[in-house]
Amino acid sequence: DGGITQSPKYLFRKEGQNVTLSCEQNLNHDAMYWYRQDPGQGLRLIYYSQIVNDFQKGDIAEGYSVSREKKESFPLTVTSAQKNPTAFYLCASSILISYNEQFFGPGTRLTVL
Amino acid sequence: AQTVTQSQPEMSVQEAETVTLSCTYDTSESDYYLFWYKQPPSRQMILVIRQEAYKQQNATENRFSVNFQKAAKSFSLKISDSQLGDAAMYFCASTTGTYKYIFGTGTRLKVLA
């Protein structure tokens, strides 16, 4: 079955540590996205990528970094510079034609201890 | 700037009854798509319904339908014959084809048995 996988489901991090969230898709989608979800704030875009080796900052990119070395993979690193990283993170993908729906992964809950 | 507003943080509906969730949006673009996504307790985002702005006919998917009022920039979701499995967070979203999707803050729907 095609879809998007995110791992791990739950992640705990100590303050000052970097942590990487995995996102893999086998839908052959060109575009991939990372969102942060906080209570009462909906989904906010962190980064997105339309093609391999290229990505753009979203609305809240500070303290985060991404890479897109393969079409299928779009890992997100939460760095120690992110002031309030505890949140639910969602990865999504879509085909590279405008106006198409996004398909979402199951998410990763990151908690900073 | 593109915005999406959901003014109802929470709604309740009796099982088998009908409920309408509200969404208003703002965009300067003439061509755009609108979506309703469902996020159940599992937190997996699922597309419910999609509306192309150039289509006057309201989209329908089984028990789910929209009331798209383009001039008023309103995009409400009607759920008929509500079921317990409809209990979830519902997000309204829009895209103008720039690969950027804007999400509302969500409406939590409770279905009462």
Image: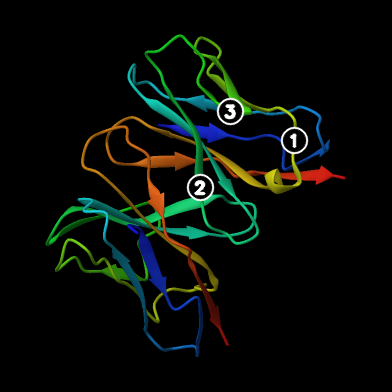
Tell me if residue A7 comes above or below residue A98 in the rendering: below
Q: Percent from the top left, x then y, of residue A25?
A: 29, 61
Q: Percent from the top left, x then y, of residue A46?
A: 37, 58
What amino acid is labelled 3 in the image?
Asn
Indicate the secondary structure of the residue bearing disc 1.
Answer: loop
Q: Are marks 1 and 3 on the same chain?
A: yes
| Res B87 visible | yes
Quadrant including the C terminus of chain B: top right
Q: Residue at x 60, y 29 (%)?
A: B23
Q: Which residue is labeled 3 in the image?
A: B62
Instruction: Report, in whole angstroms, how far the alpha carbon at label 1 lies from the one at label 3.
Output: 12 Å
Disc on the earlier residue, 2 or 1: 2
Q: Are marks 3 and 2 on the same chain?
A: yes
In the shown orientation, is residue B98 left or right of residue A14? Answer: left
Q: Residue at x 27, y 54 (%)?
A: A27
Q: Quadrant of residue A55?
A: bottom left
Indicate the secondary structure of the residue bearing disc 3.
Answer: loop
Q: Which mark is residue B104?
A: none
What amino acid is labelled 2 in the image?
Ile
Q: Percent from the top left, x then y, of residue A66?
A: 26, 68
- Closer to the camera: disc 2 or disc 1? 1
Q: Which residue is labeled 1 in the image?
A: B82
Q: Are marks 2 and 1 on the same chain?
A: yes
Please tell me which residue lies in front, A50 or B40: B40
Q: Quadrant of residue A75?
A: bottom left
Neighbor class of circle 1 (other Cα within 10 Å; few <14, some 14-19, many 20+) is many
Q: Which residue is labeled 2 in the image?
A: B46
